[in-house]
Image (tube, rainbow, N blue to C red):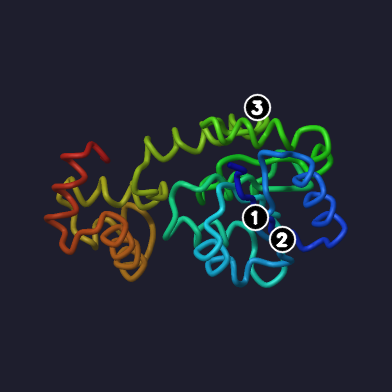
Amino acid sequence: MALTVLIFEDNPLLRESISSLISLKEDLRLAGAFENVLTAKKHVTELKPDLILMDIDMPGMTGIEAVKQIRSFNSTVPIIMLTVFDDNLHVLEAIRAGASGYLLKKHLSTKLFDSIDDVLSGGAPMSPSIARMVIASMQKSIANPYQLTPREKEILTLLSQGNSYKIIAAQSEISLDTVRTHIKKIYEKLQVHSQTEAVSKAINEKLV
């Protein structure tokens, strides 16, 4: 049975071109081709595609935002992002959001089917440079799981040493109000509600 494909691409000529390419493959069937992702949730829910090809930059709502929305109710459908530029942060953001890989638009005619085969077999089509960015991003998250800024880590360390807000302000050369603001953000990131909880978590999880 043919696998169904959904296309989201705002350029009408490119959308038609991709649709024509899909029609060339007997094992693929075009379920729909749309100029934006404003109703992507409805289309994905109703049409239940086996694969999604999505432009990364679209008016109204970006492909990255659409991926986040789709992943909120469907974590398995492969999504290949289509982009003009390689090695940019939008591609990294799309992969972080849950995209399965990406394909440069200039390579559509020569690499589309290889990318589809790759992603359907569990692969993740992407360039070595983007793969390096993804790995670096993961390593950063592992090293700093709560995404604390250097200043927040400094203040959390001082807090863990038993210093008062006043001493922290003096040592960090910032105002008392700024210390309170930083500590409030630290509590939010660590998902704690008190100094005791924050310090305990920081020590137990070796954050300081």
The CA distance from mark 1 to mark 3 is: 27 Å
The CA distance from mark 3 to mark 2 is: 30 Å
* SS for callout 2: strand
Q: Identify the residue under disc 1.
A: 6
- If the image is split into quadrants, where does the N terminus sit? top right
> Crowding near pointer 3: few (<14 within 10 Å), some, many (20+)?
few
Q: Which amino acid does label 1 sit on?
A: Leu
> Crowding near pointer 1: few (<14 within 10 Å), some, many (20+)?
many
Q: Which of 206 and 137 is in front in this view?
A: 137
Q: Identify the residue under disc 3.
A: 128
Query: Contact, CB < 8 Å: mark 1 with mark 2?
Result: yes
Residue at 74% across, 37% down: 112
Q: Which amino acid does label 2 sit on?
A: Ala
Kindly report which numbered mark, 1 or 3, lies closer to the viewer in this rendering.
Answer: 1
- If the image is split into quadrants, where does the C terminus sit? top left
Vertical placement of 29 versus 177: above or below?
above
Looking at the picture, how far across and down is residue 82, in whole percent? 71, 48
Looking at the picture, how far across and down is residue 181, in whole percent? 34, 67
**Dot placed on the residue nearer the N-terminal end, 1 or 2:** 1
Q: Which residue lies furthest to the top in this view?
A: 128
**Dot placed on the residue nearer the N-terminal end, 1 or 3:** 1
Residue at 70% across, 30% down: 114
Q: Identify the residue under disc 2.
A: 33
Residue at 65% across, 27% down: 128
**Dot placed on the residue nearer the N-terminal end, 3 or 2:** 2
